[in-house]
Structure formats: C-alpha cells, structure tokens
Image (spheres, coloured by chain):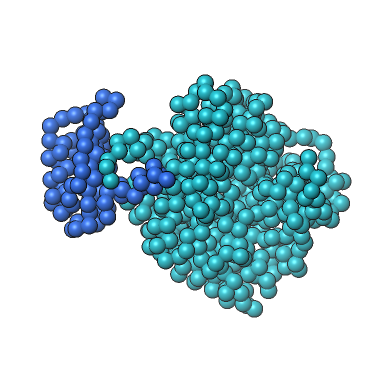
Chain colours: A blue, B cyan
C-alpha cells in the first residue's frame, strides 16, 4: 500500500530528519518527496511505500502525529488512493 | 504517482477546512428470513441477524476513515420494513420488535437503525394498521430506532386514509416525547415515492428488491461546494453550475472509494453512493450558505427556488459522472433545524413555510426538520403531508415530511434537539382549517403521465 505524508507548518530544522527517522524505524520506504513554501507555510509531500511496514497503519499515523506535535508541525498520512480517486477521471 | 501538490492540498483543505466527510455508511440487511408465527421468535431472530451481519461495521468504517484521512461520521443499519416482517403481529408485538432493533443498535454501537417502516401507498393490509398504531410508542420507548411510512407513489396515487392517520400519529409521537422537545418526530418521516436504498436517516429502509445485505454510502460536503463557489464570484451562472458539478464529482469519488473498501473488507456488496449535500448546524456546513453565495441576500428570497434547482441538478450530474451506482436521494437536503443559515433565514423572516414548500419541488427530498406549534390540529399536519406527497407524485420525485409539532411550543419559540439535529424555530403555518378535506379519506388517483405542463 502506498500513502502520502503531508507536513505543513513553519519552516525549521530537522523536519525531514524527524519524519524519516520514524519511517526508517518502521521499514517504510520513501519513493518520492517534494517541498515548497505555499502561502507562507512550509509544505512537504512524501510518497511512501508501506508494503513492508512492521506496524499497523494506525500506529504509524499516531507516531507521525506525535512527531508533528513535538516539532510544531501538522503531519498527516493518508492512503494514496484517495487523491487518485478524487482528482483523476 | 508524481506528487501533485495542488490536488493533495485541495483534498486536505476540503476535509479539514470545509468539513468534507463520509456522512454515513449504512448497511442494509434483509430480515425476510426472520419471519415467524411467534413474535418473540421474530424479535430474537431479528436481533441475532443484525448483530451477526453488522458486527464489524463500526470498527471497519473507523479504520477506513483513518487510512484515507476522511472522517466517517455515522454508521447505521437499515432493515426490511418491519410491517412486512411482523405480518403475524399485533401492536404490542411490534413494540417488542422495536425494542429488539434498539438493543441491536446499542450492541453494535451504531448511530441509528432505520426500517421501522411501512409501505402503504396503495392501501393497508390488516396489520399495517396495527403497525402504524405502534409507531408513537415505539419511537418514544427506543433511542436509535427510526421510522418512515410511504403514503404515495407516482404509479399508485396517494393513500389519503394513511395521510389522515399520520396526522394523529405525528401529534401522538410529539406528545409521548414531550419531555425531550418532541424528539420522537425527528426520527419519523412520511414519504411519497420512497427509495429502497437511501442510506440517510430517518428514512432509510432496506427495500424488498434489495439483496441479502448491502453497503450504501452517503457523502456530504456543502462546505466544499460553498468554498468552490467563492472562487467564481461575479461569473455567470454557467460557471456556477460547472463548478458545482466538478466539486460533486470529487466528493462522490471519495465516497465511492470508501464504499468499495468497506464492501471488500466486510464481504458485503456495495450498493449505491448517495451524494447528498446534507448540512450540519456547524457554520460553513450549510446548503443555505451555498444559495446565498450564488447571490441571494438571504435564503428564502425570490430566486431561491431557481438557485436550489440548479444546485440539486448540478450535484446529481457530477455524482452520476463519478460513480456508476448513484442512488438514494442524491441532491441537496434542506433540513431547517440542521442548517445554521436556514435557521437564521427563518428567524429574520426571509424563509417562510410556503417558500420551503416551493423549494421542495426542486430539492432532493422535502419538508425536513420543521418545527410548528404544538397545538396545530392533526388534520393540518395531514394536509401538509398531502401537499408534499402531491408535489412528489405529480412530478415523479421523492418528497418527504419530517415535521415536529413541538408539544407546548408556540411561534417564536425555538426547539433545541442538540447534536446533528440542531435547533428549529417554531414556524408559522396557515391558521385556516383543512379538516373536511382530510376527513374525506380515500385515495388520490395516480396522475396521468402525458399532457405534461
């Protein structure tokens, strides 16, 4: 299963480190990544592959959310399918 | 997939800022195999079947909601109309079945269970009468049971004997639930041209033409449509229609994804997607605000019916393009108490009962969540139902009445239900009598389907 991680907030050091640390820890592979500043907000999008993940989706989601709170960013993870479904005919 | 920022961020904004959600995932369950000569056995079989079939409905819906990052607000069950299942029952037996449905709903942790229903559009069976008699007590004594009765259809006409009875039934329900703002009436709908696969309450039931069990999904998102229309201010109506259609497409796709995933995980076929703009009392989650953003100073003013017609039609077109199995009531709901801007419009006098009735000729359902004074005569309630059923029957659409003659309340009072049901200002209706018309009884003949004008 592939998922999209969205990180939104004020730019600071250690954002990629904090997210990728969790992904590495749970054996989740990063397949694509981009970052940009949109409307004064730092926005990072990551496409990840969860097929070899060693925890449940909910656990990964909770870990990312907690990491987001600790660095003052909002971090979400959603299955990729929802974006495909809504934006492709 | 290349990461497309715009699409991803648009989806996130729709969910987090504009309240896009899966409003309900409703499992339809056939109870035809629960029929028995002994009502106690029937009640037990019903409880057992529902709790077995839907045991993982709530957990699965929540899990899927987390994975896709879209909230699944309500989880519900709709069953075969109970008047059919309890064919050998008397009034007390039906009450026992209602209690069994309520226990099953509590056991599953679902929000509501629908299908305490009867289809009497052409006439009554002997025990339809006993069933209708049981409705006020059943609604008063249960928490999660919802009920609906179909009194008319384009093919059969309108059963005016049923319409007459329902005036009394609604008033009695209001009286029996007087300690909770006559809340029982909020769990009861009268339909014309009822659909068999509607996932929304209080009118959901599992039609006899439906399979053994089915998953139907209802998505909402008036906030998303409003937000999209903010970007086409001052443009022509064509662009408004186009924008609504595109937005409806995206919303429906999200629902279809959830529906298919639910179906796969609980191994029950996916039925239909119902794309209904269903408001909640939250500001920004309102159908009236959509009409106002189109350029109306207040919902209810002249132009409201045209704006609503456009909205309802564009929503259906977008939805139908997005999903092959669109059903239910798809369109725009206009429940007064559940829509903050509609409540405001009633309070300031912009939106009257008569205008609401006109709006129901082009919205997806009908007169919904409207509070009237507690001393309104039964025959007036019946006459309101007859008017609404006539709009549906003649125009070949579903119409409904969910009206609350709130016990002890007068015009100017506000009936507060709380939660998603919101609060309803008591509305003024005609003071002139319809008594003689209603007391005639009988059946309004089915309309002619040609010579349309």
Of B314 and B205, the residue lying toward us: B314
Visible residue check, residue B105: no
Point 33% across, 34% down: residue? B6
Q: Nearer the viewer, residue B29 or B353?
A: B29
Residue B192 is situated, as x and y percent measured from the top left of the image, at 70, 51
- Residue B434: give x, y in percent of width and height: 83, 42
Residue at left offset 42%, top offset 45%: A89
Q: Position of residue B56 (x, y in %)?
A: 40, 63
Tell me the residue at 54%/73% (across/down): B45
In the depicted structure, whether residue B26 falls above or below residue A33? below
Residue A44 in view in this figure = yes
Q: Decide if residue A62 is on the left or right side of residue B249.
A: left
Q: How many marks?
A: 0
In screen coordinates, is B323 left or right of B178?
A: left
Residue B453 in picture, x, y percent from top left:
78, 40
Q: Decide if residue B214 is on the left or right side of residue B17.
A: right
Q: Quadrant of residue B224?
A: top left
- The residue at the far bottom in this view is B37
User: Which image quarter: residue B148?
Assistant: bottom right
Work out whether B286 lies above or below B165: above
What residue is shown at x 36% (from left), y 46% (from top)? Answer: A84
> Which is more toward the observer, B127 or B452?
B452
Closer to the camera in the image, B257 or B437: B257
Is B53 situated above or below B137? below
């Amino acid at each position: 299963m592939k998922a999209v991680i969205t990180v939104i907030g004020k730019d600071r050091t250690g954002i990629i480190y904090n997210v990728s640390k969790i992904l590495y820890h749970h054996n989740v592979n990063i397949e694509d990544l981009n970052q940009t500043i949109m409307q004064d907000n730092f926005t990072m999008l990551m496409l990840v592959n969860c097929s070899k993940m060693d925890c449940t989706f909910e656990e990964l989601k909770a870990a990312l959310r907690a990491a987001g709170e600790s660095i003052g960013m909002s971090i979400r993870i959603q299955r990729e399918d929802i974006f495909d479904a809504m934006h492709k005919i | 997939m290349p990461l497309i920022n715009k699409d991803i961020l648009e989806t996130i904004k729709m969910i987090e800022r504009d309240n896009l959600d899966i409003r309900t995932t409703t499992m339809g369950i056939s109870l035809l195999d629960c029929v028995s000569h002994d009502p106690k056995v029937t009640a037990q079989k019903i409880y057992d079947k529902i709790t077995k079939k839907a045991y993982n409905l709530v957990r699965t819906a929540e899990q899927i909601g987390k994975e896709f990052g879209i909230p699944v607000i309500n989880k519900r069950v709709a069953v075969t109309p109970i008047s059919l299942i309890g064919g050998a029952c008397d009034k007390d037996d039906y009450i026992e079945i209602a209690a069994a449905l309520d226990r099953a709903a509590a056991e599953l942790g679902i929000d509501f269970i629908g299908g305490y229903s009867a289809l009497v559009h052409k006439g009554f069976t002997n025990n339809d009468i006993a069933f209708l008699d049981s409705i006020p007590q059943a609604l008063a004594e249960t928490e999660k049971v919802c009920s609906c009765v179909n009194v008319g259809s384009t093919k059969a006409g309108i059963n005016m004997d049923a319409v007459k009875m329902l005036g009394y039934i609604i008033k009695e329900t209001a009286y029996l639930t007087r300690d909770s703002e006559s809340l029982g009436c909020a769990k009861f709908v009268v339909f014309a041209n009822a659909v068999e696969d509607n996932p929304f309450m209080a009118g959901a039931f599992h039609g006899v033409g439906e399979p053994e069990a089915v998953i139907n999904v209802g998505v909402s998102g008036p906030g998303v449509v409003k937000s999209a229309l903010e970007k086409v201010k001052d443009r022509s109506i064509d662009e408004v229609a186009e924008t609504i259609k595109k937005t409806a497409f995206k919303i429906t796709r999200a629902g279809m994804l959830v529906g298919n995933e639910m179906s796969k995980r609980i191994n029950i076929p996916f039925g239909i997607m119902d794309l209904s703009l269903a408001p909640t009392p939250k500001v920004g989650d309102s159908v009236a605000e959509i009409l106002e953003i189109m350029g109306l100073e207040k919902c209810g003013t002249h132009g409201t019916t045209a704006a609503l017609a456009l909205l309802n039609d564009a929503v259906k077109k977008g939805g139908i393009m997005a999903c092959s199995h669109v059903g239910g009531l798809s369109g725009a709901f206009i429940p007064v108490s559940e829509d903050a801007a509609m409540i405001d419009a009633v309070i300031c006098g912009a939106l009257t009962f008569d205008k609401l009735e006109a709006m129901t000729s082009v919205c997806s359902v009908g007169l919904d969540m409207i509070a009237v004074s507690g001393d309104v005569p039964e025959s007036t309630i019946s006459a309101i139902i007859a008017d609404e059923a006539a709009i549906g029957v003649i125009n070949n659409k579903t119409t409904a009445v969910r009206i609350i003659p709130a016990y002890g309340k007068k015009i100017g009072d506000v009936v507060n239900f709380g939660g998603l049901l919101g609060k309803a200002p008591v509305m003024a209706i005609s003071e002139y009598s319809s008594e003689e018309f209603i007391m005639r009884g009988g059946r309004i003949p089915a309309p002619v389907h040609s010579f349309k004008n």
